[in-house]
Image (spheres, rainbow, N blue to C red):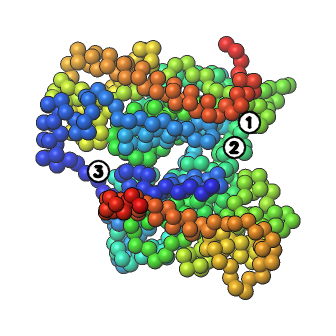
Amino acid sequence: MPREAEPSINERAFVLQALEENIRLDGRALDAFRDIDISFGDDYGVADVQLGKTRVLTRISASIVAPYPDRKFDGVFVIITELSPLASPAFEVGRQSDLETHLSRILETTLRRSQAISTESLCLVAGQKVWSLRADIHILSHCGNLVTAASLATLAALRQYRIPDTSIKGGELTVYTPLERDPIPLALLHHPLCITLNYFENGEKMIVDATLQEQQCSEGEVVVAANPQGEVCLVQKGGGGEVDALVLLRAVDMAVGKVRELGKLVDRALEKDSKMRDKGGISAELSAENER
Amino acid sequence: MVNVTLSPLYRADGSATFTSNGYSVIAAVNGPIEVQRRDELPEEAAIDVAIRPAAGVGGVRERHLESIIQNTLRHVILVSAHPRTLIQITLQIVASQDDSLYPGNLPQAASNVPVLPALLQASILALLSASIPLSMTLTATLISVKENGGVAPSPSAQDLEAATSIHVLAFSSHGDLLVVESEGYFTMDTWEKVYAKARLICHGEKEEDSESEDLSMDTEEVTKLEDILKDAVRQKVAAEYRWKQSPDSAAT
């Protein structure tokens, strides 16, 4: 398998010198994102996010399983990331790379540990039957900043997903098909997103949404996960270089601003999608969701 | 109904998406690349096919489909042109028909074959996009046989459930039969009918000696699959060679 090509010394010097003059090779401002396109599939729970040339597709699926014996009231929520040669020839089939572990850990903390999805709402019959929710994250094209693209795709897919409606009568569980009863949205408590900031010049300079080349030239990265309300779910710094505490605080501030920006983008994409699905304007009547 | 995109991915050497009849597949081809020692073949390129299901991890079904595709493509790709290298084909299933059938279960198809035509088609398009030398192209189609013996092209999920047998047939660009995968109970006569219909869909012209009286009954215009592929490639080439056109010829 070929290895990912490292930028040459000249290339590296070029990128770094340009950054010193606050110029990025694609002409963006230091805190600007590449073009973001969020689209949804025909089925519920499929989101395809394009962030410049990076492309991630997330698919949510649900099945009914027995809960873990020590957590009788909690449903199961798993996130699976697998990098394949689709994304880059450097990825091998069936071997876990460091990047993959990094990615799945960050998403795990952002979405699961922050209780973004309440696993209790996935419980059907305590101790016997719960929903097992599964997010398959397919990385289709790896051109830098996988973390943000994957978290955007997963959040958009979770927010758009509709789980089949169920009812329990006399201890018997019935699962309804979409034709019988309209499926219901998931109970998401908040909507966290991840922002990656790559730092240069001993942590003095931070850039948002690095391309693969910028990522390879950078001294390290800081991942900040937060929700649009400004609550920080995760801060992770990697790469080895030193970063001043104050700079890190500034980075978190900046990331929260970016999360709000991206959150609005997801809102807009979802609104557009629901309008497209709501042909004839009858979805409000069909909905089985309880008023809160 | 059939939707083809060439080279949608940036990092792979060649890629394609193929959407038809509720199935959608993204294929990527990398090659010829360095091959691992144990897979190396002294006189030809090794071909590696990996199928990734839309949800869940690949199992026996995926391995089975991989072996069918690998064995087909080994004869389509000019493997002797690149000895001691690897041509790696990755197929990502994006959507399949049986997703919506069983709520509360992982979307896992009951049968093996219905996704096969989309996989074959996507992989051949990705190979074209990667400019891997091929001896021919291929087209594949899915046909189900109803209980009354009627032949139904591009069946829906419900049709597949009700069918007595389902068949996947692939034809080369010369009109020769390359792949046959059949499931269910059927007679040789039914198979002949299926063959004639599939050939009509994939390759266009009927065989001279086929008894296709019942085929002429449905006179609906079938667009040949081969033409759809040709059009997709032609459009891609035209778009890529736009710079070569003189401004006045582009205007006309």
- Residue at 22% from the left image edge and 35% from the top image edge: A24
Amino acid type, callout 3: Glu
Is tag 1's residue or tag 3's residue first in the polypeptide sequence? 3
Where does residue B117 sit, x and y in percent of width and height?
60, 63
- Residue A49 as seen in the image, left or right of residue A65: left
Amino acid type, callout 1: Pro
Where does residue B33 sit, x and y in percent of width and height?
33, 63
- Residue at 59% from the left image edge and 79% from the top image edge: B175
Where does residue A88 sit, x and y in percent of width and height?
37, 51
Chain letter of mark 1 equals A
The residue where tag 3 is placed is A4
Amino acid type, callout 2: Ser
Same subunit: marks 1 and 3: yes
- Residue A215 as seen in the image, left or right of residue A179: left
Tags 1 and 2 in contact by the CB under 8 Å rule?
Answer: yes
The answer to whether residue A215 is above or below residue B43 is above
Residue sitting farthest toward the bottom? B209
Q: Secondary structure at mark 3?
A: loop
Where does residue A157 sit, x and y in percent of width and height?
54, 33
The residue where tag 1 is placed is A178
For residue A179, which quarter of the picture? top right
Same subunit: marks 1 and 2: no
- Residue B133 as seen in the image, left or right of residue B194: left
The residue where tag 2 is placed is B100
Chain letter of mark 2 equals B
Q: CA distance from mark 1 to mark 2?
A: 8 Å
- Residue at 58% from the left image edge and 33% from the top image edge: A273
